[in-house]
């Protein structure tokens, strides 16, 4: 892109990052790119200066891009902790204990504290030449790695465990376990999500399993930010009395969502304003716009641009400090810092180049930020608004000042929603129907709330004035909550159950970009590209709907310590489970994506009887029979038997052969228990069985030649039926 070299540079860097993610062990290609790039650069600079013409300049440019591509691969390799020889993932012995420091601001959950612990050293048991475990004595060895610790709040004395603090050094007993990969189709890949933050292990701790050695913050600047974050929380606790408004201010300003009520969070999600509840680039952008308007008078004075830039940078970075240096805020603060400096120094504004430069430096420091939804949405929104807001806003004019301001906000909402909704649907699977109604209100009230919060913190020490600002802050938060709640209660407020494949996402963006370019330039080439993208998108959508309408599938899902068996026919599915009806969180995390990607629009839940129930039960659904010992299901000519208990006191009257046998609740201890009772073509262990027992039975089955399946070890069991 002419005039925006950093757009090319960041594109090359991103290519190198993606190359590492796809081929982490393939260093040959990035090395070849580096070598070819250096050859092209040296060759171009070695030419006579008078002969430096466009072809040679082009070769130098290609060489630079090849070097950046190779550097992108090696930067990502260097930023991946698991590539270091002292990382915990390379440890083959049994870890007995380790020392670590809290490396991020802890989060408070309902029953636990969530803590990120950076391991410093450890001791473990190794095996000698006779394969016998031995301890390495009292010696501690250096070890690297990040662990998610879930610390139980309840202590031995029945008092609440004090909240952990950034920089605390812990001595932890036991060994963390690797984070499980997704075991259900299209389940959220929590393992990959954490791996982008160099976290690969987790451990649940009782308070007595860790001992606090002292405090040694790994980063003094981050420690200062954490202290400011705690101080700001105490100020808001005193100034904002009511829980709902305090929770909103805490979420927007401090990035702490521990106090948010589930109904309020759901309302913001339905209204398309959930992004306001997480500190992000949107907040920095709003604060930047407000400061630009409030301090605009300084730009007309001599030296005023520098004063204005100094005030803007001070307030923006004070906000970043208050958030505890939240990564999304740091990224956006860096981006707007470049914009502010460019304006102050009188440099010509090239928004694409400024965005490219900020993204380039951010990705050099943290290449995995590329895969953050917040990073993608922030840059898409700013790029779209900078490119398309002016033409849309200027297409309609109003004489009335307030009507013009309302149209300006509406145009911003339209452009931002247009450019970000495909990514939002891809990650969050819903579209807010009334975003045009909610977003202008949310933006206006946020433009009031953010500066009020900054002023309340800065002036909290002044009697009466601090109380008045706190009162105004509380009332603004109350208005924002009320407006969002009212919008979320409108009929059809959210369009749920939307799923996009990566190919569909790419085609939608092709359609949007080419369609807007067609409107702005009237170029026929964009017309053909828009038509082609539309036809391809319609084709893959129709094909996907056809496959979903004709699917016949039996599945035994992975659900921790539970049973979940589904029978899917077309867009309808029946789920047989012992999951508690109030446990929506487990369903949403483990199973919602599966049924969504299958296109299931009608899901029927059938609750299983507990083994202690003594009466037989026949459910309302056809071909289903259940007793305390077993449940028999006949569907599409296939028999499915779920076993709860195996005993010799009674014999079942069942078909001699069943198609699918699901063992649950530790019903099977020895394979001989099935002799003379039932024969199955497929045997599946769900996760309601104890893992050591299942592992032993699988090992015995391998020796006996019995084919069987475990959802804990192998993931969800899927059977496509014709």
Image (cartoon, rainbow, N blue to C red):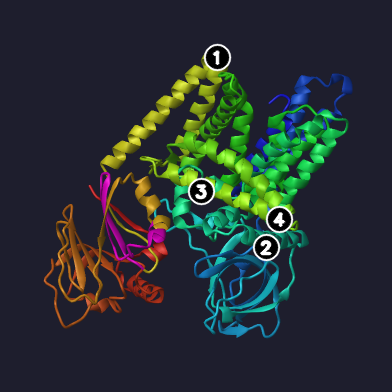
Location of residue 208 in the rendering, given as x and y in whole percent from the top left corner: 58, 82
Q: Name the residue located 53 percent from the left edge and 49 percent from the top edge.
A: 478
Does the stretch in magenta take in 584?
A: yes
Viewport quadrant of the N terminus: top right
Q: In which quarter of the image is residue 667?
A: bottom left
Q: Which of 576 and 312 lies nearest the eye of the viewer?
A: 312
User: Along the polypeptide, which appears first: circle 4 or circle 3?
Assistant: 4
Pointer 1 with pointer 4, Cβ within 8 A: no
CA gap, disc 1 and disc 4: 62 Å
Q: Which of marks 1 and 2 is in front?
A: 2
CA gap, disc 1 and disc 2: 56 Å
Helix, strand or loop at disc 4?
loop
Whether 234 is drawn above or below 338: the answer is: below
Q: In which quarter of the image is residue 664?
A: bottom left
Q: Name the residue located 57 percent from the left edge and 78 percent from the top edge.
A: 207
User: Along the polypeptide, which appears first: circle 3 or circle 2?
Assistant: 2
Helix, strand or loop at disc 1?
loop
Residue ID for mark 1: 523
Q: Which of marks 4 and 3 is in front?
A: 4
Number of residues whose C-alpha sits closer than 10 Å to that of mark 1, classed few (under 14), some (14–19) or many (20 or more): few
Q: Name the residue located 44 percent from the left edge and 42 percent from the top edge.
A: 487
Number of residues whose C-alpha sits closer than 10 Å to that of mark 2, classed few (under 14), some (14–19) or many (20 or more): some
Whether 513 is drawn above or below 172: the answer is: above
Q: Which of 66 and 490 lies nearest the eye of the viewer?
A: 490
User: Along the polypeptide, which appears first: circle 1 or circle 4?
Assistant: 4
Residue ID for mark 2: 230
Number of residues whose C-alpha sits closer than 10 Å to that of mark 3, classed few (under 14), some (14–19) or many (20 or more): some
Number of residues whose C-alpha sits closer than 10 Å to that of mark 4, classed few (under 14), some (14–19) or many (20 or more): few
């Amino acid at each position: 892109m002419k005039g925006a070299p950093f757009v090319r540079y960041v594109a090359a860097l991103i290519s190198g990052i993606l190359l590492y993610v796809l081929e982490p062990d393939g260093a040959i290609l990035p090395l070849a790119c580096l070598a070819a790039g250096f050859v092209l650069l040296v060759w171009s600079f070695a030419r006579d200066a008078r002969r430096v013409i466009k072809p040679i300049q082009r070769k130098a440019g290609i060489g630079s891009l090849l070097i950046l591509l190779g550097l992108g691969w090696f930067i990502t390799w260097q930023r991946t902790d698991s590539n270091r020889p002292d990382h915990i993932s390379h440890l083959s012995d049994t870890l007995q204990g380790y020392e670590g420091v809290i490396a991020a601001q802890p989060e408070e959950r309902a029953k636990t504290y969530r803590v990120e612990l950076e391991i410093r050293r450890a001791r473990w048991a190794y095996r000698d030449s006779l394969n016998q475990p031995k301890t390495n004595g009292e010696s501690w060895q250096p070890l690297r790695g990040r662990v998610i610790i879930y610390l139980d709040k309840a202590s031995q004395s029945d008092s609440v465990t004090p909240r952990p603090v950034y920089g605390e050094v812990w001595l932890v007993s036991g060994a963390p376990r690797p984070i499980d990969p997704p075991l259900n189709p299209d389940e959220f890949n929590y393992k990959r999500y954490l791996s982008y933050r160099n976290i690969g292990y987790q451990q649940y701790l009782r308070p007595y399993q860790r001992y606090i050695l002292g405090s040694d913050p790994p980063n003094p600047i981050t420690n200062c930010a954490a202290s400011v974050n705690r101080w700001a929380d105490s100020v808001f606790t005193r100034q904002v009395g009511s829980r709902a408004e305090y929770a909103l201010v805490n979420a927007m300003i401090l990035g702490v969502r521990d106090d948010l009520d589930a109904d309020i969070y759901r309302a913001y999600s339905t209204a398309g304003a959930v992004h306001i509840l997480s500190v992000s680039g949107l907040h920095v952008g709003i604060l930047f716009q407000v400061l630009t308007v409030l301090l605009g008078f300084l730009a007309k004075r001599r030296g005023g641009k520098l004063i204005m830039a100094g005030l803007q940078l001070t307030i923006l970075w004070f906000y970043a400090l208050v958030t505890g240096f939240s990564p999304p805020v740091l990224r956006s603060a860096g981006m707007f810092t470049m914009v502010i400096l460019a304006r102050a120094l009188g440099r010509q504004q090239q928004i694409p180049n400024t965005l490219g430069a900020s993204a380039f430096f951010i990705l050099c420091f943290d290449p995995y930020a590329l895969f953050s939804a917040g990073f993608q949405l922030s840059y898409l929104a700013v790029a779209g608004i900078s490119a398309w807001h002016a033409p849309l806003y200027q297409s309609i004019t109003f004489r009335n000042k307030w009507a013009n301001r309302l149209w300006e906000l509406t145009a911003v909402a339209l452009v931002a929603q247009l450019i970000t909704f495909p990514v939002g649907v891809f990650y969050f699977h819903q579209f807010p129907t009334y975003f045009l109604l909610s977003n202008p209100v949310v933006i206006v009230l946020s433009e009031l709330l953010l500066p009020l919060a900054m002023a309340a913190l800065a002036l909290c020490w002044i009697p009466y004035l601090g109380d008045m600002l706190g009162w105004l802050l509380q009332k603004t938060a109350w208005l924002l909550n009320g407006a969002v709640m009212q919008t979320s209660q409108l009929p059809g407020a959210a369009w749920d159950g939307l799923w996009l494949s990566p190919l569909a996402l790419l085609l939608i963006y092709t359609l949007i970009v080419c369609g807007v370019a067609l409107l702005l330039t009237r170029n026929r080439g964009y017309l053909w590209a828009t038509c082609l993208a539309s036809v391809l998108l319609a084709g893959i959508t129709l094909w996907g709907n056809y496959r979903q309408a004709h699917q016949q599938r039996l599945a035994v899902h992975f659900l921790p310590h539970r049973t979940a068996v589904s029978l899917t026919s077309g867009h309808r599915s029946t789920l047989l489970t012992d999951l508690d009806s109030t446990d929506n969180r487990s369903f949403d995390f483990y199973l919602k994506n599966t049924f969504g990607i299958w296109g299931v629009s009608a899901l029927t839940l059938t609750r299983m009887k507990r083994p202690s129930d003594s009466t037989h039960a026949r459910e309302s659904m056809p071909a289903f029979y259940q007793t305390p010992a077993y449940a028999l299901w006949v569907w599409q000519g296939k028999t499915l038997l779920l076993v709860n208990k195996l005993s010799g006191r009674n014999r079942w009257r069942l078909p001699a052969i069943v198609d699918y046998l699901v063992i649950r609740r530790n019903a099977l201890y020895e394979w001989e228990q099935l002799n003379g009772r039932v024969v199955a073509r497929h045997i599946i262990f769900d996760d309601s069985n104890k893992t050591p027992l299942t592992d032993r039975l699988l090992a015995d089955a391998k020796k006996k030649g019995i084919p069987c399946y475990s959802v804990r070890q192998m993931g969800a069991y899927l059977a496509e039926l014709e």
